[in-house]
């Protein structure tokens, strides 16, 4: 008898736990449905902003151009980044709003003796959508890094084969890393050192 009572008790406890789990699961599903309905999906996609002019010029004929997209009074606004004017021929800094608030580190290094290429490194610390391109001015070749819309933190990028050494005399074809932004021409903010940056919204 005691054994049978013990088995009945175990079965009752199992059924009770199953009921509790079912209620919790239903509640979580309902809450998730409310969250999905209340929170709009991110717009996604990449900005179509185009830098109006290079902000940084490096040794060996490489330039850095960057534009950002932000919302001001409900409208999307495209502006250029600004050169921090770091005294270096291999690395540079860019900012968007205040010079004290640096947003991006960019490096173009000579790796010709190592693997026959020039190396590129980009380290952004922003959630804004942007298009950044490094161009080999003698050939028009471009290396591109972008951050999509949606408010996600931008990723760092590095490429040890970004530009072949000696390519300035080899080809004028355009080569890119990542997706290609629209052709250059219009739609940006200030050029290099072109006055004060626009006031930050909000």
Image (tube, rainbow, N blue to C red):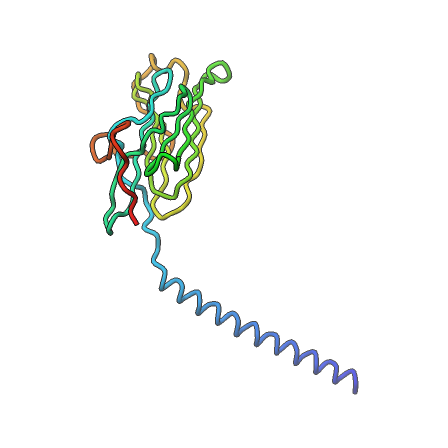
What percent of the width, then of the height, locates residue 170? 34, 14
Q: From the viewer's perspective, is residue 12 above or below residue 145?
A: below
Left or right relative to 180: residue 92:
right
Left or right relative to 76: residue 83:
right
* Depth order, front residue of 18/144: 144
What percent of the width, then of the height, locates residue 76? 25, 46
Residue 94, image quadrant: top left
- Residue at the extreme right of the image, as rendered: 2
What percent of the width, then of the height, locates residue 41? 35, 55
Instruction: State the residue at coordinates (37%, 40%).
Output: 147
* Depth order, front residue of 180/103: 103
Q: From the viewer's perspective, is residue 14 above or below residue 108?
A: below
* Depth order, front residue of 92/39: 92
Instruction: State the residue at coordinates (73%, 80%).
Output: 7
**Quadrant where the image shows the N terminus:** bottom right
* Depth order, front residue of 110/165: 110
What percent of the width, then of the height, locates residue 4? 75, 84
Residue 142, image quadrant: top left
Asked if residue 103 can be seen in this view, the reply is: no
């Amino acid at each position: 008898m005691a054994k049978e009572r013990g088995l009945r008790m175990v079965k009752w406890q199992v059924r009770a736990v199953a009921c509790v789990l079912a209620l919790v699961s239903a509640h979580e599903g309902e809450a998730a449905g409310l969250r999905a309905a209340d929170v709009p999906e991110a717009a996604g996609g990449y900005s179509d902003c185009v830098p109006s002019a290079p902000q940084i010029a490096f040794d060996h004929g490489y330039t850095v151009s960057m534009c950002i997209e932000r919302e001001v009074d409900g409208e999307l606004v495209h502006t250029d980044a600004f050169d921090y004017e770091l005294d270096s021929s291999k690395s540079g800094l860019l900012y968007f709003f205040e010079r004290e608030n640096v947003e991006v580190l960019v490096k173009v290094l000579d790796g010709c003796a190592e693997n026959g290429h020039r190396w590129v490194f980009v380290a952004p610390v922003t959630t804004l959508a942007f298009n950044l391109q490094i161009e080999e001015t003698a050939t028009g070749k471009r290396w591109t890094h972008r951050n999509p819309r949606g408010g996600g933190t931008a990723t760092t990028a590095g490429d040890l084969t970004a530009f072949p050494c000696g390519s300035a005399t080899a080809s004028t074809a355009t080569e890119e890393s990542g997706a290609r932004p629209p052709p250059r021409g219009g739609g940006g903010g200030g050029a290099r050192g072109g006055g004060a940056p626009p006031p930050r919204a909000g």
